[in-house]
Amino acid sequence: MRRTTLATLTLAAVLLGTQPASAETATATATATATATETATETETAKGWEPAPSAPWDVGAGVRCDFPVHGEPVVDEVVRRVLSTHPDGSVRRVAYKGDLVVRVTNTETGASYDADASGSAVVEYRPDGSQHWAVHGPVLVGVGQDQGSLPRGLYLVDGVYTMEISPAGYKSVRLLHGATDALCDRID
């Protein structure tokens, strides 16, 4: 379930080129946004949730798309909560949730697309390095050549689905209900 916050509405106003009616309104909006964000962060932290920021990334031509791609979060409010650990103390199951928008850019042409990857997932990390993902909503998935049930590419997979990742990195996506959006096509 996604929360619409004042911060999101303010961001939408900025992105759409609208402005508050006055400087007083802008100041009040900024103050309310900061307070709402701080309160939400404190509440999530108190419940065992912690920030799980995404790092920018780059892949060369032919790895995911026919051209080099750069990805960078433009909105990143993802949090995680450890649900269980292995006997050695390492993380076993983790829940992830929160708003995430990644700007995916073709670094040859500069074409970009802002991919809303604000899904939620429970991920099981296994001792052999494999993972099991149970997902609801959109998540960004990169697949290498012959490394998944989807062809080589970069996808926004949305819906209700599972994804198995083998120790070697093979990704098997099983959609229960949903669709895939090929991002390489969007920025070609």
Image: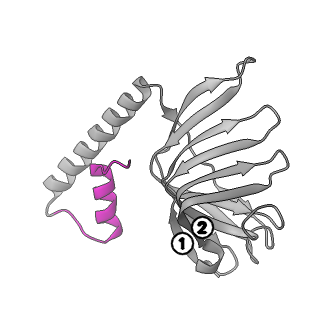
Look at 26% across and 48% down and name the residue there.
Answer: 30
Kindly state the secondary structure of the residue where label 2 is placed: strand
Look at 31% across and 51% down and name the residue there.
Answer: 4
The tag earlier along the polypeptide, 1 or 2, is 2
| Cα–Cα gap, marks 1 and 2 | 5 Å
Look at 24% across and 43% down and name the residue there.
Answer: 31
As for residue 7 lying within the magenta part, the answer is yes
Residue tagged by mark 2?
104
As for residue 117 lying within the magenta part, the answer is no
Kindly state the secondary structure of the residue where label 1 is placed: strand
Looking at the picture, does residue 78 appear above or below residue 88?
below
Q: Amino acid at mark 1?
A: Tyr
Looking at the picture, does residue 182 appear above or below residue 5?
below
Q: Residue furthest front?
A: 176
In which quadrant will I find the C terminus? Answer: bottom right
Dot 2 crowding, Cα within 10 Å, few <14, some 14–19, many 20+: many
In the image, 105 versus 163, the foreground residue is 163
- What span is colored magenta in the figure? 1-20
Q: Position of residue 16 (x, y in %)?
A: 32, 71
Colouring chosen for the image of the structure: one colour
Looking at the picture, does residue 55 appear above or below residue 86?
below
Q: Position of residue 105 (x, y in %)?
A: 62, 71
In the image, 132 versus 23, the foreground residue is 132
Checking the image for residue 113, the label placed there is: 1
Would you say 81 lies left or right of 124 here?
Answer: left
Q: Amino acid at mark 2?
A: Val
Would you say 141 lies left or right of 25 here?
Answer: right
Quadrant of residue 94 in the image? Answer: top right
Q: Position of residue 61 (x, y in %)?
A: 79, 73
